[in-house]
């Protein structure tokens, strides 16, 4: 057949590891401007180093945990309405 | 007059010819119509025309200003892309209903008065229902029915509000609503039903995911965005909209995180995105209103792109649930790439259109010193990346390979997605053409270092959370209960309660009156008088010493005579006297 080998970059554990490292590095890179920007923020509470990173991190953790919590009540089987 | 034709007319009248055109010509024809309408919008002169005197009202079918024009541009542009996407489709019913739907949405946007607005509003509701029914599954039929019922409710609120408004103000003109009373609140509710504001939002994730492949793409743009237009026009600066909008942004995220079906995730993310726009209307400054309009413009493009991407996957695999999908990057790389552009745009990644439009709303909140609103919008921005930016592409194209090897989708679909992807990036890098057509003058620079750096921080740390918490986000074969529970399950519970209570009363009444009282009355009227007559006479005979068989014979004879009404006159008179005495004694 001579079939072309399938592109499976994202299935290989060593590549996943590289992507993880890349994600950490990128997160670190976004913090660099905060060293020399000394932004004051808009409301007084948002001017410190890495504020947006922290906000994104905490907000997403809270959203996921909250969704998980309400999911206990709200999630039902797909055929729930057919019964 | 020739360069001031209502753009709605092109699509609505054009739709009537669709069944007569066969084969590929039909596909080209339906692409041509919105292209012509787009050209027509670009030629429209500011002002009002097509005024008709109708039942004592001055209706205005064409009111052209910057606000109506920008919506006219994006509605026709998106329709153009959607019909390229639908090139493979030969179904005249779907094409016609889509054209009626889009045409009447243009009718709403260019309507200068509430009466013609209401007319087009209702045509939209009816025409769009057919895009759901056209899926021809049992689920779609049921969802379509619920969809139209909710819109009938919203339409009735709107109608009641309009009637009250006209009787109070004496005008049918649709402009900024200043008075806050029952009339304007009813109109607002009518608009908010279509904007999918909770608790009237469940119709959207209930119905859109059941629509056809192209139906979903088309539906995602018009109903909610005409509602956004009406809010911008009629209710700018109504503070309640700030909070409704903020709730919508978070509500959409939580539900999108719970959902398993890719198209249901995208449906909830519409609610989330419209939330940003509604908040912008509530803030009501020139900057935030510009933001709302710009965001509606960009949202229509990237949301259609996302629905196209999910639609291509559904078209090729017949599946849309995250639990059934995964690993499609191997065989549908272009669908992935275009979908990713849409996903980055909705997340407001720098260099995409979401970044240049959403920032206007968020900065609008900053300028008004609304710290809480700003914080909620930032949290919601992080959440968007979580559910639509990463979750959708991750579970559909990556995650666990489910062994699906569908191959890339057809060329017209890819072409439409490429076109919209280009627009997403173009408006992200060079937003000036969009800023130029916004209702108010724009003095805004999205690309400042603190802004870009802050946004990248927010998004990348959100991405980090997604992958760190991946085990918690594992998809399950479930759906999440929304407010449609009340009319889906609640309807049945209500039926049960009604059955038990009302039918219970019915059964009781049946036993008591039909079986009991009326039976007793019937028996009484049959022989009651005879029995009453027997009572004193038998006592009398008994006292006279009549016993046994003779007493029985006398009793039978009297009973028969009284029942037949042939009692001796003397006995009758005596009985009457007896009863009179009895009544006298008892009283």
Image (tube, rainbow, N blue to C red):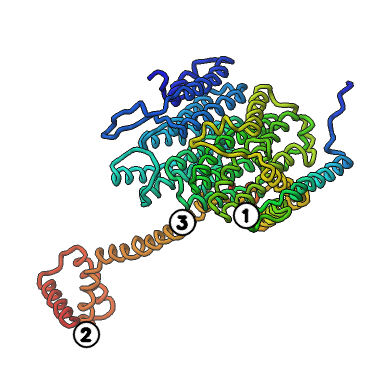
State the residue in front, B8 or B264. Answer: B8
Q: Position of residue A18 (x, y in %)?
A: 86, 42
Please tell me which residue is depicted at 35% across the width and 36% down the height of the picture. Answer: B115
B318 to the left or right of B70: right
Q: Are marks 3 and 1 in contact (CB under 8 Å)?
A: no
For numbered disc 3, what is the local secondary structure? helix
- Quadrant of the image for the N terminus of chain B? top left
Name the image quarter holding residue B391: top right
Q: Nearer the viewer, mark 3 or mark 2?
A: 3
Residue topped by disc 1 = A74
Residue topped by disc 3 = B499
Please tell me which residue is depicted at 44% across the width and 45% down the height of the picture. Answer: B235
Query: Is residue B114 visible in this depiction of the protein?
Result: yes
Please tell me which residue is depicted at 88% across the width and 21% down the height of the picture. Answer: A1
B361 in relation to B65, above or below = below
B252 to the left or right of B64: right
Q: Position of residue B445 (x, y in %)?
A: 61, 39
Query: Is residue A64 visible in this depiction of the protein?
Result: no
B114 in relation to B417, above or below = below
For numbered disc 2, what is the local secondary structure? helix
State the residue in front, B158 or B577. Answer: B158
Residue topped by disc 2 = B543
Q: Are marks 2 and 1 in contact (CB under 8 Å)?
A: no
Marks 3 and 2, how far apart at CA: 58 Å
Q: Chain of mark 2?
A: B
Please tell me which residue is depicted at 70% across the width and 26% down the height of the picture. Answer: B409
Q: Nearer the viewer, mark 3 or mark 1?
A: 1
């Amino acid at each position: 057949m001579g079939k072309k080998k399938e592109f499976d970059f994202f299935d290989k554990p060593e590549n996943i590891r590289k992507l993880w490292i890349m994600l950490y590095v990128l997160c670190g890179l976004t913090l660099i401007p905060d060293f020399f920007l000394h932004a004051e923020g808009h409301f007084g509470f948002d001017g410190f180093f890495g504020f947006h990173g922290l906000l994104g991190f905490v907000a997403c953790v809270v959203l996921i945990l909250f969704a998980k919590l309400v999911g206990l009540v709200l999630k039902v089987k797909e055929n729930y309405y057919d019964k | 007059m020739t360069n001031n034709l209502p753009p709605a007319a092109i699509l609505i009248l054009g739709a009537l010819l669709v069944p007569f055109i066969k084969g590929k010509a039909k596909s080209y024809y339906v692409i041509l119509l919105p292209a012509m309408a787009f050209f027509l919008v670009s030629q429209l002169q500011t002002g009002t025309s097509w005024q008709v005197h109708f039942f004592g009202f001055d209706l205005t079918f064409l009111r052209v200003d910057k606000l109506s024009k920008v919506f006219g541009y994006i509605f026709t542009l998106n329709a153009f892309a959607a019909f390229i996407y639908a090139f493979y489709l030969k179904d005249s019913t779907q094409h016609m209903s889509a054209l009626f739907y889009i045409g009447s949405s243009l009718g709403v946007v260019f309507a200068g008065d509430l009466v013609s607005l209401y007319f087009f509003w209702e045509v939209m509701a009816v025409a769009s229902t057919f895009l759901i029914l056209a899926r021809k599954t049992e689920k779609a039929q049921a969802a379509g029915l619920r969809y139209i019922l909710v819109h009938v409710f919203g339409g009735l609120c709107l109608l009641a509000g309009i009637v009250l408004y006209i009787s109070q103000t004496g005008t049918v003109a649709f402009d900024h609503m200043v008075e806050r009373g029952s009339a304007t609140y009813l109109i607002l509710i009518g608009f908010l039903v279509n904007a999918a504001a909770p608790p009237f939002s469940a119709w959207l994730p209930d119905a859109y995911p059941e629509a056809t492949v192209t139906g979903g793409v088309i539906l995602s743009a018009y109903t909610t965005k005409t509602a956004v237009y009406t809010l911008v026009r009629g209710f700018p600066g109504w503070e309640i909209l700030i909070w409704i909008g903020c709730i919508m942004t978070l509500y959409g995220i939580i539900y999108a995180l719970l959902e398993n079906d890719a198209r249901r995730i995208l449906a909830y993310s519409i609610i989330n995105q419209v939330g940003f726009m509604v908040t912008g209307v509530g803030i009501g400054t020139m900057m935030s209103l510009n933001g709302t309009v710009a965001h509606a413009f960009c949202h229509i493009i990237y949301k259609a792109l996302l629905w196209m991407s999910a639609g291509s996957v559904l078209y090729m695999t017949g599946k849309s649930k995250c639990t059934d999908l995964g690993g499609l990057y191997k065989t549908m790389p272009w669908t992935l790439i275009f979908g990713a552009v849409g996903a980055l745009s909705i997340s407001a990644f720098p260099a995409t259109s979401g970044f240049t439009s959403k920032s206007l709303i968020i900065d609008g909140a900053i300028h008004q010193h609304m710290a809480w609103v700003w914080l909620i919008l930032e949290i919601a921005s992080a959440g968007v990346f979580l559910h639509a930016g990463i979750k959708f592409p991750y579970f559909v194209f990556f995650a666990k390979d489910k062994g699906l090897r569908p191959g890339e989708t057809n060329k017209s679909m890819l072409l439409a997605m490429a076109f919209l992807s280009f627009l997403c990036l173009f408006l992200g890098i060079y937003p000036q053409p969009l800023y130029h057509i916004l209702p108010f003058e724009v003095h805004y620079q999205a690309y400042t270092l603190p802004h870009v750096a802050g946004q990248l921080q927010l998004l990348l740390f959100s991405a980090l959370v997604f992958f760190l918490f991946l085990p918690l986000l594992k998809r399950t074969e479930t759906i999440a209960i929304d407010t449609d529970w009340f009319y889906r399950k609640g309807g049945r519970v209500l039926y049960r309660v009604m059955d038990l209570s009302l039918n219970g009363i019915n059964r009781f009444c049946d036993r008591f009156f039909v079986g009991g009282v009326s039976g007793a009355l019937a028996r009484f009227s049959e022989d009651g008088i005879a029995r009453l007559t027997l009572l004193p006479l038998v006592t009398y005979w008994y006292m006279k010493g009549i016993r046994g068989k003779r007493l029985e014979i006398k009793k039978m004879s009297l009973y028969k005579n009284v029942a037949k009404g042939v009692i001796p006159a003397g006995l009758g008179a005596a009985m009457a006297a007896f009863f009179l005495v009895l009544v006298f004694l008892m009283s």
